Image (cartoon, rainbow, N blue to C red):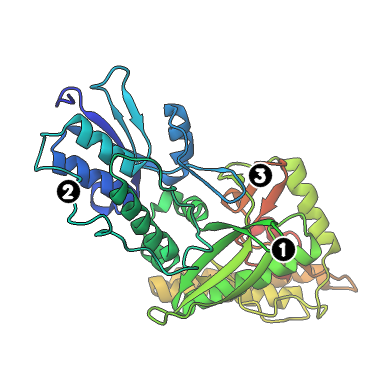
Amino acid sequence: MATASKPIIFYDIAHRPPVEETCCSPNPSKTRLALNFKRVPHKTTWVPMPAIASVRQQLGVPPCRQFADGSDFHTLPVVVDPSTTPPTLLGDSFDIAAHLQQTYPDAGDGNLFPCLPQPDALSFPLAPGSTAAMLVPLTPVRESAYPAYARFNVDVDSAFTAHVQLCVQGIPFDPATKEASRGDLLHSIISLPGGTIERYFLKCASEDAGRALIEGEFNAMSAIYEAAPDFVPKPHSWGEFRSKEPRTYFFLSQFIDMFSNWVPEPNQLCKKLARLHRDSVSPTGMFGFHVKTCQGRSAQHVGWDASWTACFTKILGHVMKLDANANGRWDAFDEIGRRITMRVIPRLIGALEADGRSVKPCLIHADLWEGNTGMSVETGDIYIFDAASLYAHNEMEIGD
């Protein structure tokens, strides 16, 4: 029997701190409810979403789900019950509930699987076709001592998984791992007619700022893909969800499984950046971009300008206005901004366009840092994403 000194170890998904107050993942919640109902001593180990696969693999708990292409889907909960010999390791919420009932039948507040008045009393399948394009795979119904409950468990999983995209904006992601966590959650593997397997990544944002971000990113990624198709995941489309409250927008692209949040290998990254800058061609011959692009949720000034000096001046002026709106006026800062705009920029940047000299408008990513780069797990190729592009001086790429 698990005891206070030798409790069950329960692995749950860590969201935004404090994790005890923001835990909300459906399947770990089933396990937490079952542990509390049976009053079995347990201790929670919180696992950041991007670390789930490695933690599960280190524990030696095989995956209980697979994507359409046969690759493993690693998720939580996992429990380790040290009261058995050897310790019991389980990685599926239904299997955990069955283990608790069978190992601790008289514990807590009763039976987790009470007798049903009729075999189909818990039958609530979704309508046909509702599960055709799940973002995450389901655990199949397996042989069980509680078959009616096993089918009901799949019905519950289906209902949540079929509509998970509707709640993505409300998930309390940990800010430290938000982008990686969203990437883990919001990709889908779909079998197309003919048996072709495609993997997709879905990004969502809401309200007017979200529309600008999504539309800008789709157009930025499309421009980079046209100039350097081996440097970004292929963008497919952007649009608005049918639900109106809040108004929510999506960006759909190819999904590439990547190692991210690391410093990329410099030779490959710089070679691809140099080629993008060299080979890209501004459609107007000017600096700027045809739609508003955003760094995070902050829109940039990207209107077309024939002069890089004028374009850069407007970009910097826009940033200073955003700062004043957010933090209030500061006379000393305003004076420095005025001197930079009136003296420094014409002297240093204006010189590049004086006496017959010119600057080539190059397509840049415009929000490039290690968090917006990744290396393909399969090929080792480096990719960039979350672009906020415009046509600019190529050195703006590293001075942004």
274 left or right, relative to 329: right
Q: Which residue is mark 2?
A: 115
In the rendered image, the residue lying farthest to the front is 118
Which of the pair 301/377 is nearer the observer? 377
Which mark is in front, 2 or 1?
2
At horizontal 90% and vertical 74% (from top left) the residue drawn is 356
Quarter of the image for the C terminus: give it. bottom right
At horizontal 47% and vertical 80% (from top left) the residue drawn is 242
Q: Which residue is mark 1?
A: 364
At horizontal 45% and vertical 54% (from top left) the residue drawn is 178
At horizontal 37% and vertical 61% (from top left) the residue drawn is 160
Dot 2 lies on which element? loop
Where's residue 82, x and y in %? 26, 22
State how far apart marks 2 and 3 are (Cα).
Answer: 52 Å
Residue 331's quadrant in the figure?
A: bottom left
For the residue marked with disc 2, what is the amino acid? Cys
Q: Which residue is mark 3?
A: 375
For the residue marked with disc 1, what is the amino acid? Ile
**Numbered label tally:** 3
- How crowded is the residue under tag 1: few (<14 C-alpha within 10 Å), some, or many (20+)? many
Disc 2 to disc 3: CB gap under 8 Å: no
Where's residue 255, x and y in %? 62, 55
For the residue marked with disc 3, what is the amino acid? Met
Q: In the rendered image of this protein, does residue 303 appear above or below residue 102?
A: below
Which of the pair 262/338 is nearer the observer? 262
Q: In the rendered image of this protein, does residue 193 appear above or below residue 372?
A: below
